[in-house]
Each structure stands twice: as C-alpha cells, then as structure tokens.
Image: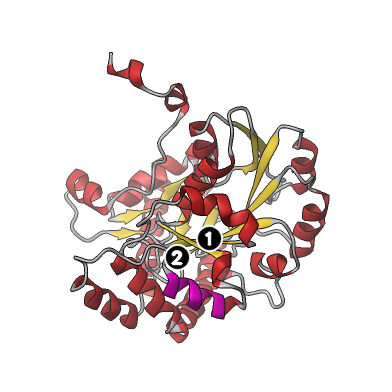
C-alpha cells in the first residue's frame, strides 16, 4: 500500500550497484586480507597534508561549513585560471549529476549518452521523468559522436559525454569534441563528465576547462575521488560559465559538502607533488599490467584512467568469484551487457602482483 505513495518514476529506477564492499567479502568468504580493485579508488589514499587538514577540521565539526565552499572555489579558480563563480562544489560528481537533472530536465525531455557508460545518467534522467536515449559506443568502445548528433531531436535537453569513459577508459580526440560542440543546437546542453581527466597524459590535450575558456557551451564535471584519493569524503565540482551554472546553484542544498571534506580537498590542491607522484605510479603499473594481461591472452583496451577494461575471453562472473575467494574484488561488466569483460582498478605494485598471481593460479587450475 505504501508503494501507492511513490512518485511513478521511482518504479523505473535501478539502484546503482557499486563495487562489492570489503565488509561483505569478509563476511561471505571468511577472509580478512582483502584488496578492492573494483571501484577505482586510489590505492595510495589522500596526501598526508590532506589527512592532517581533515583531522584538524574534525575539531570544528560542530560548525556548519561555509555553504558555497568559497575557499575551495577560489583555489580551483586560481588553478584553472577561471572565476570562482564558474565553479559549483558538490557532494561528489555523481550527486552533481543528480542536481543537473533537477536543474534542467523536465518531464519528457530526452537525455542522450553512450552505452556502456556511467549509469547515473540514466537514473537521474528517469527520476525527473525524462527519457534516456542510449547510443552504442563504436566498435573500439569510444563515444560515437556522429551517432549522438543524429539522435538529437527537438526534445533533447542534455547530452552526456563521459571522457575518459567509464567503464572502458577510452577518450575522444579533443578536436572531435570541439567539432561536435559546434554542431549541437542551442536548445541542447552538453555535460562533459571528466571524473578521470587527471589520468590523461597526452600533451596539449584540450580538457573541458580549455573548451569553456573558448566559450563553448558545456558543463565539465570533475572529482577529488580518483587521483586525489578522497572518494570517502565525497567532493566533486562542476565548471561552466555563470549563466549555465545558475540553475545548478539554485537546486544545490545549502550545506552540500561537509567541513571535513572541504578541508581535505583544499589541502590536496595545496600539495600537487603528491598527486603527480601517484599519477606516475599508476601510469607505470598500467603499462606493466597491459603486457601481463596480453600474455594471458586477454584483450586490453588502451586506458586513459586508473582502471583497465579487459576482455578475459571467458565468463567474467566466474573469474570474479574465483578472485573473491582469493581476497581480490574486481568489477564484472555484465551490468553493461559485457559478460566476458572485467574492469579492474590499477593498484599498488604489491596489490597488482597479488592479482597477477591469483589469475595465474586460477587459469592453471582450470587447465588441469
């Protein structure tokens, strides 16, 4: 009977299922030593300066945070050579996606995105009574901008482009994005989800920030969860011109981000050398793992993120279960319809060695 009180859109939603929690694996398998390589968290954690800042902020946790995260916005503005008013800070990038839905989507509006990609685009659209329009990726697992352009109608409100894409780790050439933006009609707003942008190492790659400076109409989404190692504190930010961000500011909760999280993000920006060292380690391990996976006969898509998208040439769910029994959590891509693919976070050398040996043991056992 209580279900009669629900908004009818709720029935269409499929709750997002994140990587399996460490606590669940401990309980289900009786294992205490667990390595999670399923959720693309930084295995190195936040910088020591960020940890110290968050500890200090705990002593002021009885005070509400500054509602607009002004200090953090000013630091970001300095870093990216923009105005503080061109930033909106949110409780993680995924909640900013929810707020974008509240700010822009009316009942019946169409929202286009590639598939497979981050599932929050679909859920935020459905929750507002919008219509998701899913466009398959190209054969090499890249967003198909030509097909997306063809899918735009007079009812289209938003286009999401996940770049680098999750779960594939692939990117678009920045010139392709510019060409697409120039063709998008004025009634459509492009959201460039750049949660993994910090892992792109190509020189002179034009990010959403550069495109915004060139007066392209878009919102760029970024996060402190990945390279900065602050996934547990939930800090993301949207970038755009003030006019485009205005409705987002209107629907944003007053105290959207807690004081401790803000302190960690600010301190992380003040310690760029730490993030640079983490990036170097992840890039090095990615190169090493690519060779190993290829030697195992797996297909590995070139990644521009802190995870790898791998066709393991067998039932990925079964391999995932076998790895769980060895204390390793990886992400099967079956929810995206890819039954032989895994998405595996790039861990520390020690974690990756554990994974490599575990896969080797499993494959040798299967061959007996």
Q: Name the main secondary structure of what is drawn in magenta.
A: helix
- Residue annotated with mark 2: 226
Secondary structure under badge 1?
A: loop
> Residue shown at 49%/76% (left/top)?
74
Residue 54: x and y in percent read 27, 74
> Residue shown at 53%/51% (left/top)?
248
Q: Against 353, is 21 above or below?
A: above
Residue 23: x and y in percent read 22, 51
Residue 270: x and y in percent read 43, 83
Res 257 → quadrant: bottom left
The stretch of residues the image draws in magenta is 70-78
Q: Are discs 1 and 2 less than 8 Å apart at CB? A: yes
Spatial distance from mark 1 to mark 2, Cα to Cα?
8 Å
> Which quarter shows the N terminus?
top left
Secondary structure under badge 2?
A: loop
Disc ID at residue 195: 1
Q: Does residue 279 appear anywhere in the picture?
A: yes
The magenta stretch spans residue 76: yes
Q: Earlier in the sequence, mark 1 or mark 2?
A: 1
Disc ID at residue 159: none
Q: Nearer the viewer, residue 110 or 300?
A: 110
- Number of other residues with Cα within 10 Å of mark 2, as a class: few under 14, some 14 to 19, many 20 or more: many
Q: Nearer the viewer, residue 81 or 10?
A: 81
Q: Nearer the viewer, residue 258 or 364?
A: 258
Q: Does residue 162 appear anywhere in the picture?
A: no
Q: Is residue 105 left or right of residue 147?
A: left
Residue 204: x and y in percent read 72, 77
> Residue shown at 31%/82% (left/top)?
48
């Amino acid at each position: 009977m209580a279900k009669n009180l629900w908004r009818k859109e709720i029935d269409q939603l499929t709750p997002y299922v994140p990587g399996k929690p460490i606590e669940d694996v401990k309980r289900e398998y009786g294992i205490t030593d667990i390595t999670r390589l399923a959720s693309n968290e930084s295995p190195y954690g936040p910088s020591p300066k960020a940890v110290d800042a968050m500890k200090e902020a705990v002593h002021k946790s009885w005070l509400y945070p500054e509602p607009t995260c002004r200090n953090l916005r000013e630091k970001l503005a300095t870093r990216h050579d923009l105005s503080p008013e061109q930033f909106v800070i949110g409780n993680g990038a995924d909640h900013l996606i929810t707020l974008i839905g509240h700010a822009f989507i009316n009942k019946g509006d169409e929202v286009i995105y590639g598939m497979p990609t981050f599932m929050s685009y679909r859920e935020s659209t459905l929750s507002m009574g919008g219509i998701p329009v899913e466009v398959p990726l190209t054969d090499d697992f890249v967003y198909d901008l030509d097909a997306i352009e063809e899918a735009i109608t007079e009812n289209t409100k938003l286009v999401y482009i996940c770049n680098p894409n999750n779960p594939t780790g692939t990117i678009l050439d920045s010139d392709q994005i510019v060409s697409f933006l120039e063709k998008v009609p004025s009634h459509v707003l492009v959201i460039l989800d750049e949660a993994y942008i910090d892992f792109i190492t190509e020189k002179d790659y034009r990010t959403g920030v550069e495109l915004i400076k060139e007066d392209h109409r878009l919102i760029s989404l970024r996060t402190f969860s990945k390279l900065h190692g602050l996934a547990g504190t939930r800090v993301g930010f949207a970038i755009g011109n003030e006019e485009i961000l205005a409705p987002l500011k209107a629907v944003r909760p007053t105290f959207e981000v807690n004081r401790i999280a803000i302190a960690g993000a600010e301190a992380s920006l003040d310690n760029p050398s730490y993030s640079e060292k983490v990036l170097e380690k992840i890039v090095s391990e990615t190169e090493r793992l690519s060779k190993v996976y290829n030697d195992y006969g797996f297909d590995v898509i070139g990644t521009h993120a802190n995870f790898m998208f791998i066709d393991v040439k067998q039932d990925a769910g079964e391999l995932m279960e076998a790895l769980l029994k060895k204390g390793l959590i990886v992400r099967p891509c079956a929810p995206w319809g890819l039954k032989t693919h895994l998405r595996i976070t790039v861990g520390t050398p020690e974690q990756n060695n554990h994974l490599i040996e575990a896969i080797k043991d499993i494959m040798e056992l299967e061959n007996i």
